[in-house]
Image (spheres, rainbow, N blue to C red):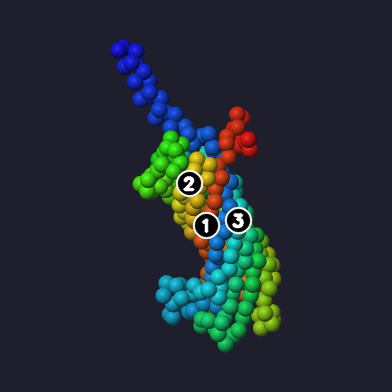
Amino acid sequence: MKRFIIAILLVCFLVPYSEAQIWKRKRYELTFGVGPSQFFGDIGGYSKGKNLLGLKDISLSQTRFNANINIAYRNTQFVTTRLSLTYGSFHSTDSRGSNETRGFDAVTSFLEPALIEEYYFSKHKGERSYLLVKRGEGTFGDMLRALDFYVFAGVGGIYYNVKGNDLLLPRMGKPNGVAVIIPAGIGGTLIYTPNVNFGFEFGGRYSFSDNLDGFTSQYSKSNDVYYFLNFTLTYKLKTGARGFFSLR
């Protein structure tokens, strides 16, 4: 009886400890993302008096796409650092908005590297449940418990190249350049298996440039901004004996 009680006490002590260490076994994550990009510059858009919180500037004609790859390291269970590389394009056009008669049109291709910190403000027990429950036996409640949510912010840069139409070319500034950007936003992940996550991420970028569309208006009072809505696939890499990721 004495041995039985000691065994029960050991299980009660060691199980929570082992579960708390599960995330350390897979500290590295490789993530791929793809989704639409929306740009807000000096070409296109409505004036503030004719706009509703900027919502009228969102249009399919100015929507383009981006794709990115990320390598992340989990510093703690709630904090992750990641390196991100994004390639995509923007479209700016006067075809709708307050300057339709001006007729400017520009397509910007870009490459954006960034260093980003994530903080998980809602971290559920999905990592434990999907390691301890056999796949296929989980309920809808288990899926909800496997949802994590985070906020992110960081610093990066953008290399851009602009191609304008004939009306824009005489007024165009530098057709390419480099600028510092500040990314920030929110995201969520669903732990599908111990190795695979599905997720989404919505974030904006503030640029320290007013020339990402190749044009700076004399009436402009702020730099360019752009937004991504990405859908992500994450694969978790095992942590090797020396603390680096392992592909085995």
Which circle marks residue 68 in the picture?
3
Can you tell which mark lies on residue 150?
A: none
Q: Nearer the viewer, residue 42 or 194?
A: 194
Give yes or no for contact between labels 2 and 3 (Cβ–Cβ under 8 Å).
no
What whole-number distance in Å separates the C-alpha atoms at marks 3 and 1?
10 Å
Provide residue 126's location: percent of width, then percent of height: 42, 42
- Which residue reaches farthest top? 2
| Residue at x 44% of width, y 80% of height | 50
**Residue under circle 1?**
231
Above-or-below relation of 141 to 43: above
Relative image position of residue 195 (x, y in whole percent): 53, 42
- Considering every residue shown, the one lying at the far left of the view is 1
Do callouts 3 and 1 mark residues in contact (Cβ within 8 Å)? no
- Looking at the rendered image, the quarter that the N terminus falls into is top left
Residue 22's x, y, as percent? 48, 34
> Which of the two discs, 3 and 1, sits closer to the camera?
1
Crowd tier of the residue under label 2, counting other residues whose Cα lies within 10 Å: few below 14, some 14–19, many 20 or above? some
Q: Amino acid at mark 1?
A: Phe
Query: Which of marks 1 and 3 precedes in the sequence?
Result: 3
